[in-house]
Image (cartoon, rainbow, N blue to C red):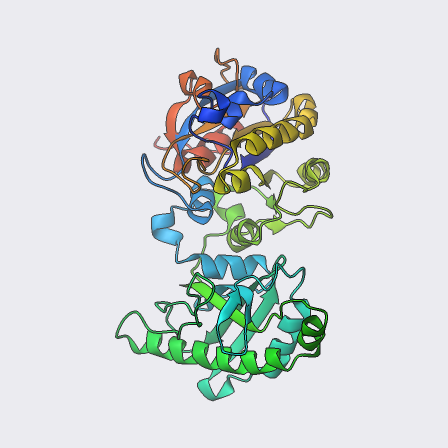
Amino acid sequence: MTAQKILLLVLDGIADRPCEVLDGKTPLQAAATPVLDRLAQESVCGIMDTIAPGIRPGSDTAHLSLLGYPPERYYTGRGPLEAEGCGIRMEAGMIGFRGNFGSLDSNGTIIDRRAGRIASTAPFCDAIREGVDLSSFGVELFIEPGAGHRAAVAFRGEGLGANVTSNDPKHEHLPPLPIRPMTDAGSDLHTAEVANEFLRQSQEILFDHPLNKQRIADGLLPANIVLIRGAGIMGRFEPFPEKWKITGSVISAAALISGIGSAVGLEPVQVPGITGSADSDLNAKIAYTEKELDRKDFVLLNIKGADEFGHDGKPLLKRDFIEVIDSALAPLLEWHDIIIAICADHTTPCSVMDHSGDPVPIIIRGPGVRVDSVAAFDELCTAGGGLSRIRGGDLMPILVDLINRSEKYGA
């Protein structure tokens, strides 16, 4: 039997380094993972450098690589991908930014970069969208809320460049910075001028917004400034269905991952109850994935949460959440007619509290796979498997070949 479907399950940041509090084990080694171990026993296994050995991948560059889009060719910055994931349809040439709503005091000093972890910024985005006028620059504004305090901003117009700085000083108790061009190009100067005018007008709107006045009256921090960063120009992506001759969907609570999927031609799927954190409804993610595989050839499923505990330096909580993930993956044991690839996008060591260049575990299970002798899913055990050590760009060709969609190279 040859499989016809592919599930690429990315366990975001699940890989780690040995932790003293776990007796020298990684959180993945220390966790009880009977489901992942069983899947590994039925797979061909290995380790993977999602970009290249020693290179610390971002989640954006890693996912592009895993989907077969070399980041050195396709990556132009996180901003446009985040904007796509927030619902802004990014056309080639548009400039995108990641954004936070923050809080300014009466002296113009940032007192909270996340506006008290505000739950929703939709009313503020609506007011800015309706009230900011950039027509004198020949530019159209797009702004959409993300999760919580997050948002995305985009500009469309002629002569725009993406080499501009951020207004975010990255620390509280400092004033916001002016946006500056990073080159002498007129296009970058134009974008800096547009961005500064956007920030000026939006700040006036936010200071007078009734919801902010109410928040102040209730003793809450106002969301009265937009902090933008990660500028990038939207590029052109060969559509995923044309590149790999298969249809696909993406399931992720992270706007960035949904944006990457949407940008390359995967259909984003909205799943109620998913948050991208430890409280996410993982069972719903698996249920929706199964439904998507009934109608599509390929699903990219991203499960976050473990990555957050790595960034927070909490190995015990990371271990415990890995066990939660493992339990939610139990239905995969019954999926025998599809190719299932499970990996991380990067290593997030609790000791580093950021991404590192360590390789990640990778397993591939399904019809036609040459099962090896690996008995457990972790950073060390999978290294002894039949895949050996591959790069992220190798993964899609391997998966597409296993469903017999590859074209012969040569006669």
Picture quadrant where residue 394 is located: top left
Q: Residue at x 47, y 89 (%)?
A: 136
Counting from the top left corner in percent of width and height, residue 289 is at 67, 38
Q: Nearer the viewer, residue 356 or 315?
A: 315
- Residue 159 appears in the rendering: no
- Seen as rendered, the residue at the extreme top is 373
The relative height of residue 245 versus residue 104 in the rendered view (above or below) is above
Counting from the top left corner in percent of width and height, residue 156 is at 48, 74
Counting from the top left corner in percent of width and height, residue 75 is at 39, 54
Which quadrant does the N terminus fall into? top right
- Residue 341 appears in the rendering: yes
- Seen as rendered, the residue at the extreme bottom is 136
Picture quadrant where residue 150 is located: bottom right
Q: Nearer the viewer, residue 331 or 113?
A: 113
- Seen as rendered, the residue at the extreme left is 184
The relative height of residue 111 versus residue 12 in the rendered view (above or below) is below
Apparent side of residue 129 relative to residue 218 in the rendered image (left or right): left
Apparent side of residue 157 relative to residue 208 in the rendered image (left or right): left
Q: Nearer the viewer, residue 249 or 400?
A: 249
Which quadrant does the C terminus fall into? top left
Apparent side of residue 37 relative to residue 217 in the rendered image (left or right): left
Q: Nearer the viewer, residue 297 or 180?
A: 180
Picture quadrant where residue 3 is located: top right
**How many numbered dots are placed on residues in this image?**
0
Q: Residue at x 62, y 18 (%)?
A: 34
The relative height of residue 338 versus residue 303 in the rendered view (above or below) is above
Counting from the top left corner in percent of width and height, residue 213 is at 68, 77
